[in-house]
Amino acid sequence: MKDFTAYLNETEEIGYVEQVADAIIYVSGLPKVKVDEIVVFETGEFGHVFSINPDFVEVLIFSKQHIQPGTRVARTNEVLRIPVGSGLLGRVINPLCQAIDDGKPIQGLSERRPIHPPAPGIIERKSITKQFETGVLLVDLAIPLGHGQRELILGERKTGKTNFLTRTILTQTKKGNICVYAGIGKKKMDIKKVAEFFKKEGVLDKMVIAATGSSDSTGLIYLTPYMAMTIAEYFRDQGKDVLLVLDDMTSHAKFYREIALLGRRFPGRNSYPSDIFYAHAKLMERGGNFKTDKGEASITCLPVAETSQGDLSGYIETNLMSMTDGHLYFDRDLFYLGRRPAIHPFLSVTRVGRQTQDVLRRELSREIMSFLNLYEKMQSFVHFGAEINENIKATLSMGDKIIAFFTQITPHVMPLKLEMALFAMFWANLWDGKDANSIKDEMYKTAEAYNSDEKIKKKIDSLSETDSFNKMLGIIKQEGPGLLKEVLVRSGN
Amino acid sequence: MQNNLPSSDIFKNLRTLKETEEFLSQINNTLESLFKIKRGSFSQVLDKNMGAENAQILKKIAEEKKIDLSNHSSLEKLLFEIKQEISKVKVLKLYLAIDPTPQIIENTSSWVKENLGEDVVLDIERDETILGGAIISFDGQYKDFSLRKTLDEIFKSKRNEVFALIK
């Protein structure tokens, strides 16, 4: 960027700061300024034109530096563009693509992209056909997602949403896909912990962490998800499948509300501005599955929304639900019961994930959901305290085991074929008579063997090469015991 | 500027922003004094706060609008209206390398009022770094006619010659 005087001489227009209201600066003058244009102050700061009125221009400033009334302002005749490139991988950056980790200055930024481009039209899009693996058994088997889906992660504080996201990011990065994590107004310590965790797991070089702290300026926090989406679009255009995590959109809405109220917008429901839906919808629409010059590529978007006291009918939450292709609801009660992840299978929805499943997976998914439904109904009998018959006892026992089966505490990455094989082994009663801990132990040993032994991996993968779940169960009953024995021998039992 | 007041006489006397601010301050003082005076001594207050020339203009306006000088409410309303009109002046900012003489200010102000409107006042600031010429800023437009800019442009265009000389 050039300096203030250069822009002043170039554009021959000047403005003066009339009023300062925290993140919004009211500037008089600048007769030909455009919305979304960048303006530069004579103190060196720059801002983004938020709105234009007959008497003044509202500028959203990106710095916490105090600007004096009377300060001169010049137009730049440019919209906000951020530098993007492969040099961003492995780095922690702010919305202006400046490094905020301890590394060297960022190199390899080959192009500049606008932060608010229009969403691609219908022609550039493709149907979602490929399943998106999260590495979480319950989601991959029962509530499947697709590459290019926008799935809302919804739940209260401390219900395991971040653990789920971490596992998903690990799964995707280990498959070679790019992940962009946007931390919106988070604590700086939390951002550092996230970066260190992924560095320790050895996947940080496949990620970009775009973060703003809660002490950063409101203007900068507001830009974070849009900038993260722009970076995701860059990697999509390189032909890569990208996972974009927006953590979290309810905070983003609150910061946008603050900006709007400072800008004297008329407060709507819950004092949010009337365009809060548009602010989020224009972002979500940029996700999806696309045709690019380098082939099919997708941006799978996982926005996070924090509910309050389990209220799913909140304004921002319902807005986000309506603009995404489903939601995963993290139930506080299930969390307290020890379920990990605490995803409520009946309150969670996937609108697009099922079309990515083949016949086998669809049958598997249907089997799981119908059994869980039965289990829920059976649970109500227990409350009556009456005598329960053997069938109900067996169902309840199986249900408890299924819940234990789906409980994942350690961050083991589970590829989809492995998940399917494990579930089929479980359903075929290969672990009959064993307690939950032993089952879990043998499952993890199988997972380790799958990840390290090519022969075992091939055998397990071949189990899911059938076109029906019943056939798969038949094969498992024959070959499963031998396979399990091989795994246990390999692990020294 | 829509104007129900014959305030063009006031604007004629206001050449610079400083004079405008002074005039507004005088009006504020007069407003404060308005309800402290005894009946019939508004004229004395005006003379005391505004100076002879401005006081005369205000009395003339009051006469033209048929306002009784002993009717304090009407006088207050009139002064508020004048204050509002004066607050809407447009400012032409001038950066000069020198402190302008009263003659320069008078000539410049006359030209500005004749060509840009009577409600335009000057805000002249001294900036020695421009070396000469002027920088003009008005209604959001900015034009740099300074000697500094001219010299910068000359040096830019003759850069190669300058390097050749140094080598």
Image (spheres, rainbow, N blue to C red):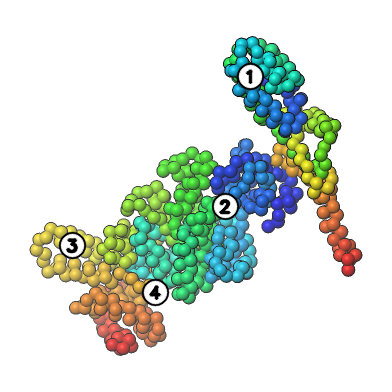
The 10 Å Cα crowd at callout 3, few under 14, some 14 to 19, many 20 or more, is some
Residue type marked 4: Val
Query: Who's the residue at 47% across and 70% down the image?
Result: A196
How far from the left and from the top, in percent, is residue A114? 60, 56
Q: Which label lies toward us, 1 or 3?
A: 1
How far from the left and from the top, in percent, is residue A235? 55, 66
Q: Which residue is mark 2?
A: A64
Query: Who's the residue at 76% across and 30% down the image?
Result: B15
Q: Which residue is mark 4?
A: A413
Q: CA distance from mark 2 to mark 3?
A: 58 Å
Residue type marked 1: Leu
Image mark 1: chain: B
Element type at mark 1: helix
Q: Which mark is residue B78?
A: 1
Q: Which residue is mark 3?
A: A378
Image mark 2: chain: A
Given residues A58 and A426, the one toward you in this image is A58
Q: Earlier in the sequence, mark 3 or mark 4?
A: 3
The 10 Å Cα crowd at callout 4, few under 14, some 14 to 19, many 20 or more, is many
Q: Are marks 1 and 4 in contact (CB under 8 Å)?
A: no
How far from the left and from the top, in percent, is residue A322? 41, 51
Q: Which label lies toward us, 2 or 3?
A: 2
